[in-house]
Image (cartoon, helix red, strand yellow):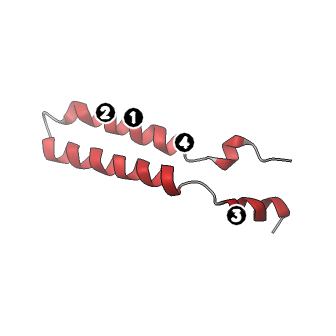
Amino acid sequence: MPAPRACLRPWWFGVAVLGLNAFAQMFFIPSYPVWSVLIIALDVLAIYGLCVYGGRSAEATEQAAQGG
């Protein structure tokens, strides 16, 4: 029995929150330009990390399905 899709990709919530934060930081650029650009860059870096490395590996999924 295959695992539900939500269990295989739990990082979508983090990507959504970081995306919203990066968008919201654009409103603060006139007040805090360096800080806002730094936070946007960190959000983009974290989104990249979650998308590339955030999911379970195939081996970990198989081991969890086998019970050990």
Q: Is residue 50 above or below residue 66?
A: above
Give the label, 3 or 4, closer to the camera. 3
Alpha carbons under labels 1 and 3: distance apart: 30 Å
The numbered mark, 4 or 2, whose residue comes first in the sequence reads 4
Q: Residue furthest top?
A: 27
The span from disc 2 to disc 3 (Cα, nearest Å) is: 36 Å
Query: Dot 2, how many residues are within 10 Å of its Cα: few (below 14), some (14-19), or many (20+)?
Result: few
Mark 1 vs mark 4: which is more N-terminal?
4
Q: Residue at x 64, y 60 (%)?
A: 57
Viewer-nearest of labels 1 and 4? 4
Q: Secondary structure at mark 1?
A: helix
Judge the density around disc 1: few (<14), some (14-19), many (≥20) Cα neighbours within 10 Å: few
Q: Residues within 10 Å of mark 3 (few under 14, many from 20)?
A: few
Q: Which mark is residue 12?
A: 4
Q: Seen in the image, is 63 located left or right of residue 32?
A: right
Q: Quadrant of the C terminus?
A: bottom right
The tag on residue 60 is 3
Task: For label 4, count other residues whose C-alpha is less than 10 Å away and answer few (under 14), some (14-19) or many (20+).
Answer: some
Callout 2–callout 3 Cβ contact below 8 Å: no
Question: Is label 2 in a helix, a strand or a loop?
Answer: helix
| First of labels 2, 3 by sequence position | 2
Q: Real-space Cα distance between discs 3 and 4?
A: 19 Å
Image x and y of residue 29, in percent: 17, 36
Q: Residue drawn at (69%, 47%), measured in percent from left and top?
A: 7
Mark 2 and mark 1 residues within 8 Å of each other at the beta carbon: yes
Q: Hey, what amino acid is under mark 2? A: Ala
As drawn, is 58 to the left or to the right of 20?
right
Residue underneath mark 1: 20
- Secondary structure, mark 3, is helix
Number of the front mark, 2 or 3: 3
What's the amino acid at mark 4? Trp
The residue that appears at 19% across and 47% down in the rendered structure is 35
